[in-house]
Structure formats: C-alpha cells, structure tokens
Amino acid sequence: MSELALLILRIGFLLLLWFFIFAIVYALRSDLFGAPVRRLRTDGNGNPVPQPSLQVTAPAAPAAQAPAAPAHPVPSAGGSGPARNLVITSGVASGTSIPLDDDILTIGRSGDSTLVIVDEYTSTYHARLARSGEEWILTDLDSTNGTRLDGTRVTRPVQVPLFTPVTIGTTTFELRP
C-alpha cells in the first residue's frame, strides 16, 4: 500500500474517531441537562400567552400579590364539583394554573409533554394524568425519582382527590374545581 493511501486511511479513522467522541458528548449533555429551555411568550403585561404545552423552567416575575391562600383550602359545603384546573402550589412556577381541557395530561422533561417540568429530579416521561368520567387517575411512568400523592409514592394508577398535593421532582400541584 502506498504512503499516500496509508495517510488518507489514518486521517479517515481519526475523523471517524472524533465524530464518535462528539456524538457521545452530545448524548451525555442532553441526558445531564435535559431539553433546551424555551422562554414563554408574554402579552406585554407579563401574562403568558397560551401554548400547546406549559414549560415550567423559571420563576414568574414578582407582581402585586393578593393575600396568600391557605396551602390546602377546604372546599365549600355546596359540593366542590369535578377538577377543572391543575394549580402548581410549590416549585419554580408556583401559582400557575393550567385548565384541564384534555382527557390526558402528560408530565415530564420532554418537550412533547403537556406539562414540561425541567429539573434534575423529573424524568423525561415522568407521569400521566388521565380523566376517567369525573375522576382523574395518576400513573407514574416508571420514573427514576417517583411520583408522590399526598407524600405516598405512587406505584400503581391511583385516583387524585381534589386539593391533594402531587409531587413530581421539586414541583407540587393540586387538582382544583
């Protein structure tokens, strides 16, 4: 084999090696840091514009706040009705309310989740909330750190009562009428 062919072969193998190294670094980066952060669009008054999914990545800007409501409000005696909103009670998007318009709500770090929670304790596909009649059923999707309903780890699909805290990663939310 000529020296020129040997040199070209060596350079080709070196380029192939670098290609694999960059591919591994890219895969590790996406595993460690998750999906890229997307900023929520606002309407000029600081209110988020509705989007197909809500990404929980940064705290809301401080604004004039009403007096704080109790952590677990008691429903009125006239019946509380079915859950119509998911309200984030703690975490980076505390105070955010999401209408429960769809029958299935997916939760995780993945950009195609309905509720995107970007923190190091949330799996890419973490949990699913599904409507069954007037009830909501919570299913953990074999997440690494688990899903907790009122402090108890969810190991099978369970019904989520109103005003009961659900914790995923560092975010806690409740279903409310």
Image (cartoon, grey):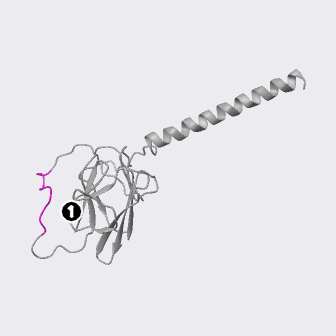
Where is 175 relative to 91, above or below?
A: below
x and y, in percent, of residue 142 in the image:
41, 57
Q: Which residue is mark 1?
A: 164
The local crowd at label 1, few if under 14, some if 14 to 19, many if 20 or more residues have their Cα within 10 Å, is some
Where is 10 relative to 91, above or below?
A: above
x and y, in percent, of residue 44 in the image:
33, 48
Q: Quadrant of the N terminus?
A: top right
Residue at the image point whose x is 43% and y is 45% from the top = 38
x and y, in percent, of residue 106 in the image:
40, 61
Residue 37 image-quadrant placement: top left
Residue 26 image-quadrant placement: top right
Q: Is residue 114 left or right of residue 169?
A: right
Q: Is residue 124 left or right of residue 61?
A: right
Residue at the image point whose x is 11% and y is 76% from the top = 78
Q: Is residue 33 left or right of residue 26?
A: left
Q: Amino acid at mark 1?
A: Thr
Say which of 49 and 33 sits in front: 33
Q: Quadrant of the C terminus?
A: bottom left
Start and end of the magenta stretch? 66-75
Q: Magenta region's main secondary structure?
A: loop
